């Protein structure tokens, strides 16, 4: 009806400053039976904050979340307000994938390469927060077992490709270095040693090159950047020509990106909603096939894209 409902109550405390706050929310794969929702957020802590994921039951009247349980939290606390990540998706294996940023500041960047830190990683856990036995670093001394992949800067979108079940992530890169990555178990995506683009200041990224032995190249990258937000694969019926395409919100570019993929490669790109003029934070596909986007503005909008 065009009206914003009352906020849902029952959520834990949130560190809402800078890029921190509530970050993503998804339904349990069995929501129809258990009414469970999962959300990522910046968790306030003594001495700083960190990315965390909680779950709870949505009440029957949709007014509150009950029986809240934190199922994941990054190991290290940091006093900063940038690069929390964080996007969520359940894979076809039933596991929960979580994207985590490296917290932006130069002293924190090397944590992306450290298996003793959750920063700059994609995390994979069971729905209850336990660690899957087939995670790539389970049993390795000094490595955190929740880690699925590493070498990320600030991945803000993650999605499962229909048909293949492949997990893809979208990375908010440096100036000229936004990336689309195909997620692989145990893979190193390079940051900060392997990266496209330069610092926002215009200076080169210290010690970085576009390729580095032992790292995985992005499937696709943007220069100039789009500053990507959320991501989803289109699997609806309203726009049949978009079937299997990736839809990505552009924060800096202020439009919706449609990528055509074939055999693991990007073969086409279209820019949509170019006249909206607002930062597109996230994108979703409704059961009827319509596309919904939410904008990140002082007075943000929820926009429905549909056929007339």
Image (cartoon, grey):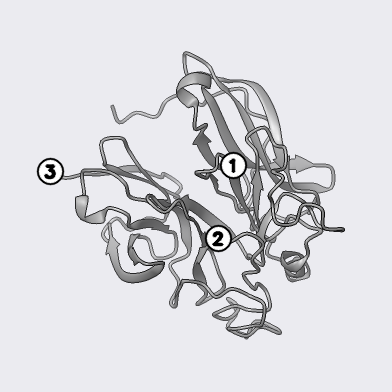
| Image point (44%, 59%), residue name | 251
Looking at this view, name the residue that lies furthest to the right.
141
Q: Residues within 10 Å of mark 2 (few under 14, many from 20)?
A: many
Establish if 307 lies above or below 259: above
Q: Where does the C terminus fall, quadrant-wise? A: top left
Establish if 11 lies above or below 289: above
For label 1, the SS is loop
Looking at this view, name the residue that lies furthest to the front.
134
Q: Which residue is mark 1?
A: 95
**Between 177 and 19, which is closer to the camera in this rendering?**
177
Label 1 and label 2: CA atoms lie apart by 14 Å
Label 2 and label 3: CA atoms lie apart by 36 Å
Query: CB under 8 Å between callouts 1 and 2?
Result: no
Which mark is in front, 2 or 3? 2
| Image point (78%, 61%), residue name | 115
Q: Which residue is mark 3?
A: 308
Query: CB under 8 Å between callouts 2 and 3?
Result: no
Query: CB under 8 Å between callouts 3 and 1?
Result: no
Which mark is in front, 3 or 1? 1
Q: Position of residue 198 (x, y in %)?
A: 58, 81
**Between 240 and 86, which is closer to the camera in this rendering?**
240
Q: Position of residue 260 (x, y in %)?
A: 31, 64
Label whose residue precedes the other's in the sequence (1 or 2): 1
Label 3 and label 1: CA atoms lie apart by 38 Å
Using the rendered image of the protein, determine whether residue 187 is visible from the camera's viewpoint. Answer: yes
Q: Quadrant of residue 241?
A: bottom left
Q: Is residue 79 left or right of residue 247?
A: right
Kindly identify which numbered label has been placed on residue 141. none
Label whose residue precedes the other's in the sequence (3 or 1): 1
Q: Residues within 10 Å of mark 1 (few under 14, many from 20)?
A: some
Q: Which residue is mark 2?
A: 183
């Amino acid at each position: 009806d065009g009206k914003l409902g009352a906020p849902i109550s029952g959520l834990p405390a949130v560190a809402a400053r800078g890029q921190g706050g509530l970050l993503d929310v998804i339904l349990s794969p069995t929501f129809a039976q258990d009414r469970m929702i999962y959300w990522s957020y910046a968790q306030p802590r003594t001495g700083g904050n960190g990315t965390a994921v909680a779950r709870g039951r949505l009440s029957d009247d949709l007014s509150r979340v009950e029986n809240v349980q934190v199922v994941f939290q990054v190991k290290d606390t940091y006093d900063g307000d940038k690069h929390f990540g964080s996007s969520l998706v359940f894979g076809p294996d039933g596991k929960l994938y979580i994207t985590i940023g490296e917290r932006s500041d130069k002293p924190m960047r090397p944590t992306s390469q450290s298996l003793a830190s959750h920063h700059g990683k994609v995390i994979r856990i069971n729905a209850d927060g336990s660690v899957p036995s087939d995670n790539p670093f389970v049993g390795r001394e000094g490595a955190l077992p929740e880690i699925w992949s590493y070498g990320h800067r600030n991945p803000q979108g993650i999605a499962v490709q229909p048909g293949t079940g492949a997990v893809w992530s979208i990375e908010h890169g440096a100036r000229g270095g936004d990336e689309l990555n195909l997620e692989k178990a145990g893979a190193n995506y390079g940051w900060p040693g392997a990266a496209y683009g330069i610092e926002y200041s215009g200076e080169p990224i210290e010690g970085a090159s576009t390729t580095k032995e032992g790292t995985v190249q992005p499937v696709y990258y943007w220069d100039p950047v789009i500053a990507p937000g959320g991501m989803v694969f289109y699997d609806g019926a309203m726009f049949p020509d978009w079937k299997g395409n990736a839809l990505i919100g552009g924060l800096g570019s202020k439009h919706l990106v449609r990528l055509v993929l074939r055999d693991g490669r990007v073969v086409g790109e279209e820019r949509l909603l170019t006249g909206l003029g607002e930062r597109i934070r996230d994108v979703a596909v409704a059961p009827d096939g319509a596309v919904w986007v939410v904008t990140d503005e002082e007075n943000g909008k929820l926009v429905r894209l549909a056929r007339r």
